[in-house]
Image (spheres, rainbow, N blue to C red):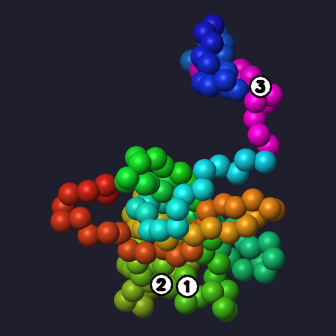
């Protein structure tokens, strides 16, 4: 058994092998030093390189329209920091142009040449796609947070760069 302290509030203990070759873990959290009102670091408005880590098909709760929720890993080249951001591609009457712009910028082959786009089938094709995200800020439950305002094509890097 070994215990690893991740930070002042988080500790992981590796327990003995469970007999199937998998170590079981126990997790301990100390919330005494955690500010429940903190929403995470807010980055400056701007354009940042990003890559899609996950893309999940579902139906929008409010409208019932099909949608893909993209989880972006966003990088700040100046600081070397990364953060996650989420963008929802909702396929509804008033949102189709935004979805088309996004797909043309990061995955044009999914909609070009008369191909029919199927969000359930094609969501997985978005994983690993590079682009840039335009971050802005919004107010959510009294807290300022970042949000993805727009998805742009990947930056040109002349063969050298983050996504090559």
Dot 2 or dot 3, earlier in sequence: 3
Badge number at residue 6? none
Badge number at residue 101? 2
Q: Check if mark 2's residue and mark 1's residue have beta carbons within 8 Å.
A: yes
Is 116 positioned to the left or the right of 32 in the image? left
Q: Residue furthest left?
A: 158
Give whichever of 28, 66 is nearer the camera.
Answer: 28
- How far from the left and from the top, in percent, is residue 13? 66, 16
Q: Between marks 2 and 3, how big is the CA–CA gap?
A: 45 Å
Q: Is the C terminus in the top left, top right, bottom left or bottom right quadrant?
A: bottom left
Determine which residue is flagged by label 1. 98
Is 161 positioned to the left or the right of 66 in the image? left
Residue 33 is at least partly visible in this image: yes
Q: Quadrant of residue 138?
A: bottom right
Q: Check if mark 1's residue and mark 3's residue have beta carbons within 8 Å.
A: no
SS for callout 3: loop
- How far from the left and from the top, in percent, is residue 94? 66, 91
- How far from the left and from the top, in percent, is residue 52? 48, 60
Residue in the image at 52% along x and 76% along y: 150
Q: Which contiguous range is marked in magenta? A: 22-36
Other residues around mark 3 within 10 Å, as few (<14) / some (14–19) / many (≥20): few
Q: Quadrant of residue 146?
A: bottom right
Above or below — where is 123 with respect to 63?
above
Badge number at residue 30? 3
Residue in the image at 80% along x and 72% along y: 61
SS for callout 2: helix
């Amino acid at each position: 058994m070994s215990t690893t302290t991740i930070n002042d509030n988080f500790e992981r203990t590796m327990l003995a092998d469970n007999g199937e070759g998998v170590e079981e873990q126990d997790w301990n959290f100390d919330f005494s030093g955690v500010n429940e009102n903190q929403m995470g670091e807010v980055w400056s408005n701007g354009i940042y390189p990003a890559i899609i880590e996950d893309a999940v098909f579902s139906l929008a709760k409010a409208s019932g329209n099909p949608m893909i929720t993209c989880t972006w890993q966003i990088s700040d080249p100046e600081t070397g920091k990364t953060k996650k951001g989420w963008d929802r591609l909702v396929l509804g009457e008033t949102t189709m142009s935004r979805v088309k712009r996004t797909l043309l910028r990061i995955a044009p082959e999914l909609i070009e040449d008369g191909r029919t786009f199927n969000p359930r089938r094609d969501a997985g094709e978005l994983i690993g796609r590079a682009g840039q995200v335009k971050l802005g800020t919004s107010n959510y439950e009294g807290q300022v947070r970042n949000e993805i305002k727009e998805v742009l094509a990947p930056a040109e890097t002349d063969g050298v760069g983050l996504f090559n």
